[in-house]
Amino acid sequence: MKENDLLDDCQRHLLSSSDSEDDQRPDINDLYIDVLESEFQIPLQPGWFSRRTRMERYLMLAATTAVFVVVGLAISLAGVVYSYRMGILKGSDTSMLPLISAEPLTACQETFPESPSETCQSKGCVRAAAKLIDSMDEAVNPCDDFFRFSCGGFLQKKIIPDEKSSLSRFNEISDDLQEKLRGLVEADPSDDDSPATKMVKNLYKSCMDTDRINERGLNPLKEILTQMGGWPVVEGAAWDSSGFDWHTNVYINRKLGYSLDYIFDFSVTTNIKNSTWRIIDLLIHPPRFQFSLPKEERRNATKLYNLMTVAELQEKVPQIPWLQYFNTILSPFHEIGIDEPVVVGVPDYVKNLGKLLTRTPKRVIANYMLWRVTAASVGYLTDDARDIQLKYSKKIVGKGTREPRWKECMGSVSGSLSHAVGSMYARAFFREDAKAAADEMVRYIRAEFDQILHTIDWMDEATRERALAKAKAITPHIAYPPELLEDDKLTELYDGLEISNGDLLENMRNLTIFGTNYSFKKLREKIDKKDWKNHGAAAVVNAFYSPLENSIQFPAGILQGVFFEAERPKYMNFGAIGYVIGHEITHGFDDSGRQFDEKGDLRDWWEKQTKDKFLEKAKCIIYQYGNYTAKEVNLNLNGINTQGENIADNGGIKEAYYAYLQWAKDNGEERPLPGLPFSTRQLFWLSAANVWCGKYRPESLKLRILTGAHSPAEFRVNGPFSNLPEFAKDWSCPAGAKMNPSKRCAVW
């Protein structure tokens, strides 16, 4: 490694002068001592030189001269290093040192007080150090590209498996979690298995029974298509359009366990302006037809909240029999009248769609709707049918091979019976010390966000008071609710669901019917925002913020691996899961989350001048990320669509950083990791970056940029880190470096 590729001179000196006896890096003083010892251990024998031949004498003389030259150089270099150290640490005149300016020295002096004399030698520290070393590329200058400095080894060594469209730390933890679950689910049935556990094992078994699936072939799908009136593209001229009506087919979908949302999304959901009650919602997900609202305009929740009665909707869109439509779908749980309130996401969309459905040939509509049914079914059919799906996937995300069958089945089971699977995982694998540690970090990080709210200079006092009230009201849900371990609660939750070890497609349709019924039954029920069932998906590698609950959730599945380990130093955990915790807290105050108050209701609680200042600061983030280019596909990011996640990233890492500094102040400085020449603060940044090590297939990266809400991995590191002066200071990045720009963006 070339010196100038990694660290400036100031850092190189401080990091190579460790007093730790466990440090494996060769110190120049150690080399000097080794040379002297080798000299003095040569036994001196009288007459020995005179007994040598002339050639041997010449060779010995040359060797001795070379040794003394090495010793002289070593002493000189040691003297320079010592003088350099004294100049930095004692404030001596350093003007005669070449290639070192006063500015980096000042930053170095302020950033790195002398570290503890010993590195941490625990197993947790050794493992953490090994993982960082394996991920890094120390040939990259951290002030130029911290993502590749931290993750370059990962990018070089890791190969995206054929069955994946991308590879990330999330994938690695999820794969490990799935392996653990596989062991639980494939275990022999036991009399001690709860009804929920039996259900999980039956669903998994039906998915793994490829002999039965292949034996039945396409017959399950053919039977379904027949009940829906036939698929015109298959039936050809024999298809009879006289018996087809699109809303009648929606009713059939409801009965047979398929989605109701092929034309528009019908749901019973939380009323965002009165979040303790539910309401009927017609939400249009972007973009299915030309009348849909662009994604960039859908970030304003008020724009999507258009309240009207069924009667008003009928008048606006007379082509659709709305009262009949709603009552048929809600049957047998509710019957509504023409005065029932409905939230219509995009009224013009529904109005234009009504006209479009009237003038579009029935054959076209039927082909579209039954294609959607077929596409939803293919994954549960024969290998030949699934190969067609795979070809489509190859074009869209670049994935050319299916995952192992067990992994596909485990994914389906985990997604469909998340509470039952989460219960099994929590009982077998979750460590309670992880929950206690996460609780502690949440407290520290929330305190730092409160401090930010107290000190920012662009917020008026009235808005500040409301913001503090909202921050205080955030409810954390860590790991899993205790009810998840109660068999009776799970039995009650899944009451009425039928899962057999037989037909896979039938099982999946039963799950859809059960989920739809569960949702629709709750139309008239008051919402309990702390209901354990809303936070019971424990075996998930993700984290969430709910604006309607004003809550943050960190399932048990993410409290492991690169995100969290109880045995490693706190700076590693604050950098990793702490970054995620701060990210989720900040979501409550990003461009979308800020639209909701402390109760979870859509309400404008901002004074105008403060809202204008927020939008101006958000605009900086939009422009910054919108000017980032993913070179692999030569596409710029969409700064508007990703602004919420980017604001959360920038706020989250800042909160986690200062939370760790406060923790260290309260509990004492920790020792750095062995084998790495970095301070604890630098290791915080490395841990945070390591969370986002990942790579994509070009097709997947392109799709992510065009449709996703998250920036690609490298920009989730370089973007927020470069916006923080604290990062540049800790790494002594010179002014104007890519990671220490002259212009920065900051919202929180």
Image (cartoon, grey):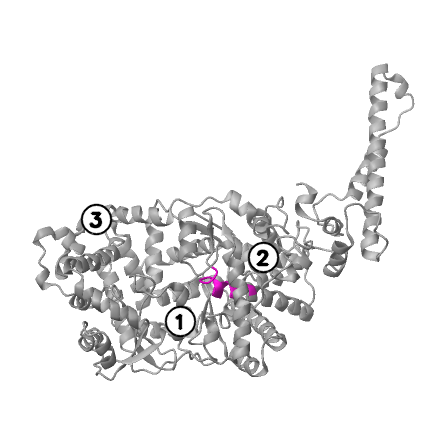
Question: Between 7 and 483, which is closer to the camera in this rendering?
Answer: 7
Distance of label 3 from label 1 (alpha carbons) = 36 Å
Crowding at mark 2 (Cα within 10 Å: few <14, some 14-19, many 20+): many
Choose the circle earlier in sequence order: 2 or 3. 3
- Is residue 645 on the magenta stretch? yes
Q: Are marks 2 and 1 in contact (CB under 8 Å)?
A: no
Residue at x-position 84% and y-position 53%? 86
Name the residue beneath numbered marker 1.
484
In percent of width and height, residue 418 lies at: 36, 65
Q: Is residue 437 left or right of residue 70?
A: left
In percent of width and height, residue 350 lies at: 26, 70
Q: Main secondary structure of the magenta part?
A: helix
Name the residue beneath numbered marker 2.
687
Q: Name the kind of residue labelled 2 in the image.
A: Ser
In the picture, which quadrant includes the C terminus? bottom right
- Determine whether 627 is above or below 62 in the image: below
In percent of width and height, residue 66 lies at: 82, 28
Under tag 1, what secondary structure? Answer: helix
Q: Name the kind of residue labelled 3 in the image.
A: Asn
Crowding at mark 1 (Cα within 10 Å: few <14, some 14-19, many 20+): many
Question: Between 320 and 174, which is closer to the camera in this rendering?
Answer: 320
Distance of label 2 from label 3 (alpha carbons) = 47 Å
Q: Are marks 2 and 3 in contact (CB under 8 Å)?
A: no
Name the residue beneath numbered marker 3.
214
Residue at x-position 68% and y-position 51%? 677
* Magenta-colored span: 639-650
Q: Is residue 250 left or right of residue 166?
A: left
- Determine whether 300 is above or below 428 in the image: below
In percent of width and height, residue 740 lies at: 64, 56
Question: Between 557 and 379, which is closer to the camera in this rendering?
Answer: 379
